[in-house]
Amino acid sequence: MTRRVENYKLVFVGDSRSGKTCLLKKLLTGTFCCNHAPTDGVDVHTYETQDGERLVRFTVWDTGGASDFTGMRDGYYLNGDLFAFFCSRDDTQSVSNLSQWTRDVRRVVGDLCPSRCVVVLNKKDLGDTQASALFASLRIKLPVLHLSVLEPHNDVALFSHFVHRTRRLSSGQ
């Protein structure tokens, strides 16, 4: 059986402490890390998953969310195929900044096609918060995943979402 390999650059975007690195580390190591240093600039990792005859390879660019790295981010977004915008249920500023993150990426890559993007509203385990109420009022026009990195299989949920989306992209739909 011949396997078709598809490569995608997936960029994680969002404020510091929104769960980007924790989700990726949990996926790669199987353990949740609650204390880690903020990402300096960008960390790049590969994640592969089988989808029928397709081997889907994601090169994940985990970008630092601190404002110290604002000038470097444009280069990280270039040639991005897929984007995951992270915000946190326990941080109203994180949710408020979502529109700025999408504007920044749009400025570099052009229009954000909903089939290539998702908003990750992380820390679902906290239930409804002021930040989740604010999020509901934003009327985001992108698909939204409500998840918690603490819960089993939520690390895979994001990648499953993109595997499904890339299946449609690779078939020309």
Image (cartoon, grey):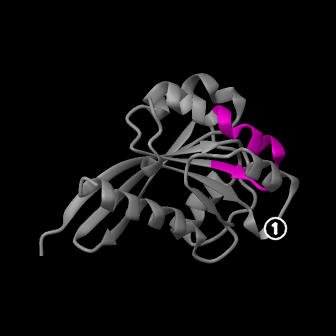
Residue at x 55%, y 25% (from the top left corner): 72
Q: Is residue 70 above or below residue 172?
A: above
Q: Which residues are magenta?
A: 86-100
Furthest residue toward top: 71
Q: Nearer the viewer, residue 16 or 92?
A: 92
- Residue 164 at x, y = what percent? 39, 64
Q: As drawn, is 99 to the left or to the right of 111? A: right
Quadrant for residue 31, please give it. bottom right
Q: Is residue 58 magenta?
A: no
Q: Nearer the viewer, residue 152 or 97?
A: 97
Residue at x 57%, y 75% (from the top left corner): 153
Furthest residue toward left: 1
Residue type at mark 1 is Gly
Residue at x 45%, y 33% (from the top left corner): 111
Q: Can residue 90 be seen in the rendering of this structure? A: no
Q: As drawn, is 171 to the left or to the right of 45? A: left
Q: Secondary structure at mark 1?
A: loop
- Residue 94 at x, y = what percent? 76, 43
Quadrant for residue 102, please give it. top right
Q: Which residue is mark 1?
A: 127
- Residue 46 at x, y = what percent? 41, 55
